[in-house]
Image (tube, rainbow, N blue to C red):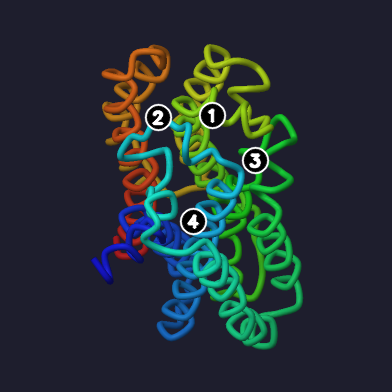
Amino acid sequence: MGLKKWLLLIRAPFLTLPVALAFLGTSIAWYNGFFHLGHALLAFLGLLLAHISVNVLNEYHDYQSGVDFDTNKTPFSGGSGVLPAGLIKPKQALWLGLGSLLAIVPIGIYFVITSGLALLWLLLFGAACIVLYTPFILKMGWAEWAPGLGLGALAILGLYYIQTGGFTQEAIFASIPSGILVHNLLLLNELPDIEADKKAGRRSLPIFIGGAKAAAVYSFLTVLVYLWIIVGVVTDFMPAFSLLALLTIPMAIKAIRGALSYQQMDRLVPALASNVMVVIFTQLLMGLGYVLARVF
């Protein structure tokens, strides 16, 4: 159980997200003629550490607030359970979360020096989102924007900037689907935890506007991802091969149907699984589209 408990704490199965983000952001840069393997690997490490920090600090705050004792746990929401079970001490989790965040600092300094000062503001904003998300942002009424930006759109732009030393309108446009997808990853996972989050004084979007409206927002934004990609191809902001991302539409339909029936756990849990696959594979297929566009 030694290693397994730590893998549970960092939510290892969900660390496929930084893989997808790193692949997409780097693929966009490569499509534009920029690629440095060492920088790509180091940037991925930084993104991975950021995601671990987010996961672990969220586990710590959920335990401290008592949310972990009231959630309806699913394979995709409700936390890992290692802190309530006493497998890991809360202080150990806190130090791991903060340590992962601090480990990013030298990586960030290196890239600010080698790529440019504009990256500093992205990194500072991302760090603020990590540290402030659970204790402060999650009480604002619409907290999902923070991971959508910090671990979505801005992550893509940061990866692109590291390779190219600048931004383009096309890169900014291509980062939006990632922002929406990561936003929706959090949003749908919050639906089973509405009552537990209320007790902890949180104000996630499902609490602020209600579960039914939150499910409708999720559905609209999911459709918007695919429309955005289609518009991007039509307007030449994205290569035609980006349409490969539309292959995840059947999974998205399943996720939407489950979201709209969120009060039925037997339909919501499969929707949570489909949503994870939509988030990961839509970005991987977009990245593959950029690679194929460069090759052909």
Residue 265: x and y in percent read: 32, 19
| Residue most extreme to the left | 1
Instruction: Choose mark 1 or mark 3, whichever is in front.
Output: 1
Q: How would you rate the neighbour count of disc 2 (Cα within 10 Å): few for under 14, some for 14-19, many for 20 or more?
A: some
| Residue located beneath label 3 in the image | 145
Quadrant of the rendered structure where residue 291 is?
A: bottom left
| Image position of 50 (left or right of 168) | left
Between marks 4 and 3, how big is the CA–CA gap? 17 Å
| Residue located beneath label 4 in the image | 55
Residue sitting at x 64%, y 76%: 165
| Residue located beneath label 1 in the image | 196
Tally of marks = 4
Q: Look at the numbered discs 1 and 2 and tell me whether their residues touch, using CB distance below 8 Å.
A: yes
| Image position of 34 (left or right of 98) | left
Q: Look at the numbered discs 2 and 4 and tell me whether their residues touch, using CB distance below 8 Å.
A: no
The amino acid type, in three-letter code, at marker 2 is: Asn
Between marks 1 and 2, how big is the CA–CA gap? 8 Å
Q: How would you rate the neighbour count of disc 3 (Cα within 10 Å): few for under 14, some for 14-19, many for 20 or more?
A: many
Quadrant of the rendered structure where residue 44 is?
A: bottom left
Between marks 3 and 2, how big is the CA–CA gap? 24 Å
Q: Which mark is residue 72?
A: 2
| Residue most extreme to the front | 86
Q: Which mark is residue 66?
A: none
Point out the tag, 1 or 4, that comes first from the N-terminus.
4
